[in-house]
Image: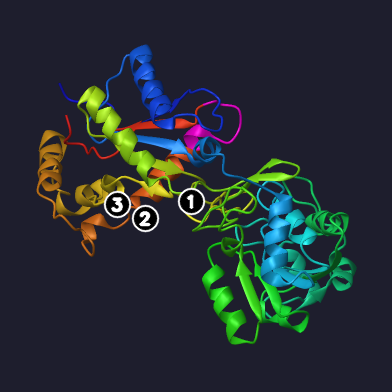
Amino acid sequence: MERRVGTCSRGIRGPIIREGDNLVEITVDSVLAAAESEGFSLRDRDVIALTESIVARAQGNYVSVDAIAEDVKSKLGGETVGVIFPILSRNRFAINLKGIAMGCKKVVLMLSYPSDEVGNALLTWDQLDEAGINPYLDVLTLEKYRELFGENVHEFTGVDYVAYYSDIIKEAGAEVEVVFANDAKEILKYTDCIINCDIHTRARTKRILKANGAKVVCGLDDLMTASINGSGFNSKYGLLGSNKATEDKIKLFPQDCQQLVLDIQASILEKTGKHVEVMVYGDGAFKDPQGKIWELADPVVSPAFTDGLVGTPNELKLKYLADNDFANLSGAELKEAIANSIKNKEANLVGNMASQGTTPRQLTDLIGSLCDLTSGSGDKGTPIILIQGYFDNMTTN
């Protein structure tokens, strides 16, 4: 019988994860229990995905603000530190900023404008146009910013991040000076010890600062790369990808979780005979058209995945075939002609006009985005996602 359903994404409910929990056992048992409860079966090339949060929690990968402060002081000297290009987020950056400020005497906070790297806006482009400000060239002091634009609160959170971040720094015991600029070199007028907090542009920012005389440059990925007094750490990403846990503690991005996905894959194969793919996912990679926020605040969508998730889709565009190659066909003849094209398609369709308009992104980014939208970030209680049919096409039975 012809299959009538394509890709299906299911949120799988699981227990609240605590440090030391066996995620292999919990994940496999949760997926199999859901299959029995809902009356579906696993198939080869199904995808099982775990949110990075439960992986890091099971690892106990947490860091206190005291540990961050110690690392900052050790690496940047504890005097005046430039903190540039942070994202505007209570969850993602505020606690990091508290720890950073505790580790120095003064913070020169340089904010990009009109928005941060992932689209959280301080200002609108209309405001800049009306004030005659060119964000690519103009540098604003806090006084000039307030004179021109007054108080600006975030559309969704209602927070004035300029005041909020300034208060965090002062409450941590450090002096604060705020600057608005988009050229990394501007911070060198204030200090030569800098923490660049940008995520996806961090390598370029470090290169520019070092080439222009910075004494010490640390990205967030250079802080908490090793344990301090028994704390958690992430040797590859440091503080990047971290989330607020409490008022004085953050949860880091998971550390070394490749073996986890391999063990889950092996356990499913042993119990069901099915070869599934497994991944750990964080933020999806998509943009909100209303708030203009690009979701990806993690350094990558997926820090660990099995080999079957390497690469990009290799798909033909059905409407292109229908409107061009087989424009003279309809009904069963059209369906058969397209099915034959799919069955005989090349292993690599890059440059083929019949693939134009298909999504040229990494599989892990596409699937991770689907997982993130399925699980959400609130109280759904589904930290495990099962995706079926993702690698099927219209010829799959």
According to the picture, the residue beneath numbered tag 1 turns out to be 285
Check if mark 2's residue and mark 1's residue have beta carbons within 8 Å.
yes
Q: Which amino acid does label 3 sit on?
A: Val
Q: Residue at x 50, y 50 (%)?
A: 286
Mark 3 or 2: in front is 3
What mark, if any, has residue 361 been given in the picture? Answer: 2
- Who comes first in sequence, dot 3 or dot 2? 3
Q: Position of residue 322 (x, y in %)?
A: 21, 47
Amino acid at dot 2? Arg
**Magenta span contains residue 256:** no
Q: Is residue 43 above or below residue 212?
A: above
| Spatial CA span between label 3 and label 2 | 11 Å
Secondary structure character of the magenta stretch overall: loop
Relative to 117, is 55 above or below?
Answer: above
Q: Which residue reaches farthest front?
A: 229
Residue 185: horizontal and vertical position, in percent? 67, 81
Q: Is residue 379 magenta?
A: yes
Image height of 91 relative to 311, above or below? above
Say which quadrant the C terminus sits in. Answer: top left
Along the viewing direction, whichever of 267 and 39 lies nearer the viewer: 267
The answer to whether the residues at label 3 and label 2 have Cβ atoms under 8 Å apart is no
The residues colored magenta run 373-381
Q: To which residue does mark 3 refer?
A: 310
Circle 3 SS class: loop
Residue name at image x 75 percent, y 79 percent: 191
